[in-house]
Amino acid sequence: MSAGSIVFLVIVGFLIVGLVGYFITIYNGLIRLRRNVRKNWSNIDVLLKQRHDELPTLVSVCEGYMKYERETLEKITSLRSAYLGAKTVGEKSKVEGALAGALKGLFVVVERYPALKADQRFAQLQERISFLENQIADRRELYNESVNIYNIRIHQIPDKFIATACNFTPNELFEVSEEERKDVKIQFNFPGQK
C-alpha cells in the first residue's frame, strides 16, 4: 500500500467515526428532549391526580348546601370520570379545560351560599384546589416549553434526518380550546323558576 492510500483510508476512517459520533450525539439529544417532555407531562399528571382526588370530597361537601346546583356538581363528577378515561395528551387537555371551567363556575356559584362559604372543610378544599390549579398552570407552561423545544429540534436540519429515520414524532401542546376560554355562564335554578 502506498502512503497516499493509507492517508486516504485514515481520512475516510476519521470521517466515518466523526459521522457516527455526530449521529449518536444528535440521537441522544433528541432522546433527552423526548424524555423531558414525558417527565414534564408526568409532573402535570401527578398534580391533576391530586386535584381529582379532592373532587369527590368537594362535591360531597357542596351537595348538602347546593340543592339547586345539582347540574354543576354532576358535571364535575362526569368530567372527572372522562379524564380518567382519556388516553392522549390532547384528550386530557380538552377534559382538563372543561373541568377547570366547571370548577371556576362552582366557586362562583358558592358566592350564593354563605353557609357553604363559611364551612371550614369547604374553605380548606377550595384553598387546596386553588393551590393545585396554580401549580398545574406553572407545570403546563413548563410542559409546553419542553414540547416546543423538542418539536423544533425534530424539524430542524440536520436533526430532522435523524428524527425521521428513528421515528421521532411531534408531541401535542397542552392547549385550551376556544370553547373552554369563554366566560363561565352561571344560572341559578330556584324552586318555582323555569
Image (cartoon, helix red, strand yellow):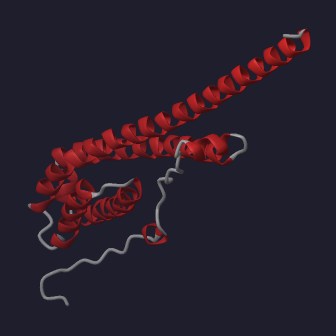
The image quarter in which residue 193 lies: bottom left
Q: Quadrant of the C terminus?
A: bottom left
Tell me what residue is drawn at x 66 percent, y 44 percent. 161
Asked whether, in this view, residue 2 is left or right of residue 66, the answer is right
- State left or right for residue 64 relative to residue 136: left
Query: Residue reaching furthest right?
Result: 4
Quick one: 160 or 135, which is closer to the camera? Answer: 160
Q: Looking at the image, which is closer to me, 186 or 7?
A: 7
Residue 114 in the image, given as x and y percentages of width and height? 21, 59
Question: In this rendering, would 56 be left or right of 160?
Answer: left
Q: Vertical placement of 9 versus 108: above or below?
A: above
Nearest the viewer among 100 and 35 is: 35
Residue at 23% x, 62% y: name it: 76
- Please provide percent x and percent y for residue 85: 24, 57
Total count of labels: 0
Q: Position of residue 92 (x, y in %)?
A: 35, 56
* Vertical side of 162 occupied by 2: above or below: above
Looking at the image, residue 186 sits to the left or right of residue 180; the answer is: left
Furthest residue to the front? 1
Q: Quadrant of the N terminus?
A: top right
Residue for point 58% across, 42% down: 150
Q: Nearer the viewer, residue 82 or 127?
A: 82
Residue at figure coordinates x 20%, y 45% from the top left? 53
Outermost residue, left side: 64
